[in-house]
Image (tube, rainbow, N blue to C red):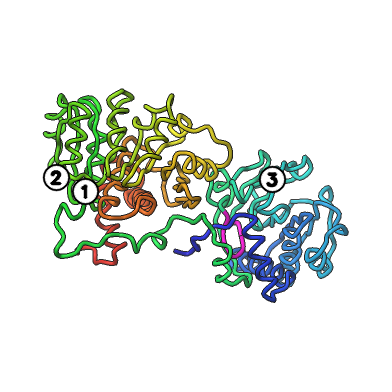
């Protein structure tokens, strides 16, 4: 993993700066290190040429002055452009402006003819307003000219906390940030504007993270690998956990079948599809390692869960938006099992979300996970803010762990922890992919992982399986990639 997993909000990054300064590192030294890191990355990536450095009115602009000076010393022809009055700069940024010995152009004086590279040091991660007309027009000229852009901290117009993007922001080729990345580097639409992300060490010690205690991380095996359940010689199928996948009727059997097979691949010792009696033969003829049982009503279902000591229940895929789905979800939540609520089991509560939240709140044993995509999320929650903020709000409101799906899937807990997944390729946008994800998580929970860790691991494995299989995959392809991925995660040879 080339990127640290901790993600710092803008305020947490300010705190990191303050801790470093209190520890004896001057603000000027931090800015000098930031500018040098950017300049070094540029000289390693591009040949010497003509650079245009756009400097804004704050510390981001101060970084730009450092970059301009160092690139000039490296042989670049540099045009430095200030978007405001450079004499109004204060603090460390004023110090760096004073060290620049070349001309400072106003925005209206700038030319982009023959420019090989633009450094965008106008606004950083704390940007939370609109780009003004003059800056917007100049950025549009750069975009139309197709000039590569290196963004300092964040592309101007992109918010570091939320990933929100001003309508006039332009994409960067590379974004260089400092110490740790921000959530906005990985939340869409901001992620699409950052290009390749590079993190520079500017002299802030890692141990300051203990004081900051960041609650948001990138989803990576580093944060959950130790919780994977490695098989022991004395294990048997029921010691590995029994997963129940509630299936739908005859016309919608594929979702539950995909999920159940994925659960077995991911670590469940046994998996059973629970279906309406009329669909029993359809499921039984299509499944081999997965068992099938018919439950006519909630009483049968509750008794079966109790008698078979079911540890994990996945309900929703292909179930239909019916009273049966709602009643079976209630029985699942009243059981001691861990419960993963997906698809139709979410939608069926769209008119009575409080009833679902009450069931989750009253659950005595086991943990609960909600796995909505955006449309399903809106059926239960009407929450403002970024994807991260909405997922955290939904977890706090519902009492469940919430996995909000998408290219930037967010997994959030009711106590304020979250991960952002970033390895999912676009090839996963295919029917049944989400059912496989639900099954993977269910299998990992069955094997003994806590729900939050299992959701994080399942999401990462799902993305890695999609990456390995590549373009043209269908959902049935994903489970076949899981054994090799797990072997690598466990540190085992691929034929183990």
Rendering coords of residue 46 (x, y %): 61, 63
Residue drawn at point x = 81 percent, y = 70 percent:
99
176 is within the stretch colored magenta:
yes
Q: Is residue 122 left or right of residue 224?
A: right
Residue drawn at point x = 27 percent, y = 40 percent:
335
SS for callout 3: loop
Residue that numbered label 2 is attached to: 289
Image quadrant containing the N terminus: bottom left
Residue drawn at point x = 78 percent, y = 59 percent:
79
Residue drawn at point x = 35 percent, y = 46 percent:
367
355 is within the stretch colored magenta:
no
Q: Nearer the viewer, residue 305 or 237?
A: 305
**Mark-to-mark CA distance, 1 and 2:** 8 Å
In magenta, the rendered stretch is 175-182
Residue that numbered label 1 is attached to: 264
Residue that numbered label 3 is attached to: 128
Rendering coords of residue 297 (x, y %): 20, 26
Q: Would you place residue 54 above or below residue 393 in this image?
A: below
Task: Please identify the quarter of the rendering in which residue 227 is found.
Answer: bottom left
Q: Earlier in the sequence, mark 2 or mark 3?
A: 3
Task: Please identify the quarter of the rendering in which residue 287 is found.
Answer: top left
């Amino acid at each position: 993993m080339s990127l640290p997993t901790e993600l710092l909000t803008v305020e947490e990054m300010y705190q990191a700066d303050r801790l470093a300064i209190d520890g004896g590192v001057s603000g000027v030294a931090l800015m000098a290190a930031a500018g040098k890191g950017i300049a070094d990355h540029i000289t390693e990536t591009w040949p010497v040429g003509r650079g245009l450095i756009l400097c804004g009115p704050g510390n981001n602009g101060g970084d730009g002055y450092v970059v301009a000076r160092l690139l000039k010393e490296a042989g670049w022809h540099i045009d430095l452009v200030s978007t405001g009055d450079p004499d109004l700069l204060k603090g460390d940024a004023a110090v760096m402006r004073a060290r620049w010995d070349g001309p400072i152009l106003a925005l209206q004086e700038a030319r982009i003819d023959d420019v090989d590279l633009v450094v965008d040091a106008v606004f950083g991660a704390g940007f939370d307003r609109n780009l003004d007309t003059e800056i917007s027009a100049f950025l549009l000229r750069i975009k139309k000219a197709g000039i590569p852009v290196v963004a300092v901290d964040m592309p101007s117009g992109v918010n570091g906390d939320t990933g929100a993007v001003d309508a006039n922001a332009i994409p960067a080729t590379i974004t260089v940030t400092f110490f740790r990345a921000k959530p906005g580097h990985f939340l869409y639409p901001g992620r699409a504007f950052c290009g390749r992300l590079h993190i520079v060490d500017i002299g802030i010690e890692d141990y300051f993270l203990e004081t900051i205690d960041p609650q948001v991380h990138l989803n990576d095996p580093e944060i959950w690998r130790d919780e994977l359940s490695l098989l022991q010689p004395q294990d048997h199928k029921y010691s590995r956990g029994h997963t129940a996948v509630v299936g739908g009727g005859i016309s919608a059997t594929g979702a539950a079948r995909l999920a159940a097979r994925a659960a077995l691949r991911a670590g469940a010792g046994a998996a059973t599809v629970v279906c309406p009696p009329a669909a029993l033969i359809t499921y039984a003829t299509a499944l081999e390692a997965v068992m099938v049982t018919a439950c006519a009503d909630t009483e049968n279902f509750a008794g079966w869960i109790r008698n078979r000591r079911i540890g994990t229940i996945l309900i929703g895929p292909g179930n239909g938006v019916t009273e049966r789905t709602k009643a079976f979800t209630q029985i699942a939540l009243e059981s001691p099992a861990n419960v993963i609520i997906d698809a139709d089991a979410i939608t069926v509560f769209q008119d009575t979300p409080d009833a679902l939240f009450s069931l989750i709140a009253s659950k005595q044993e086991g943990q609960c996970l909600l796995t909505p995509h955006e449309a399903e999320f809106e059926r239960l929650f009407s929450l403002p803010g970024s994807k991260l903020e909405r997922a955290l709000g939904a977890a706090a409101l519902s009492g469940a762990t919430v996995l909000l799906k998408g290219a930037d899937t967010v997994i959030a807990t009711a106590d304020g922890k979250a991960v952002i997944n970033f390895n999912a390729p676009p090839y996963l946008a295919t029917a049944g992919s989400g059912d496989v994800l639900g099954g993977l998580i269910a299998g990992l929970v069955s094997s003994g992982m806590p729900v939050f860790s299992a959701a994080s691991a399942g999401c990462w494995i799902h993305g890695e399986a999609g990456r390995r299989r590549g373009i043209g995959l269908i959902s049935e392809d994903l489970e076949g990639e899981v054994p090799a991925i797990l072997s690598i995660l466990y540190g085992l040879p691929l034929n183990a």
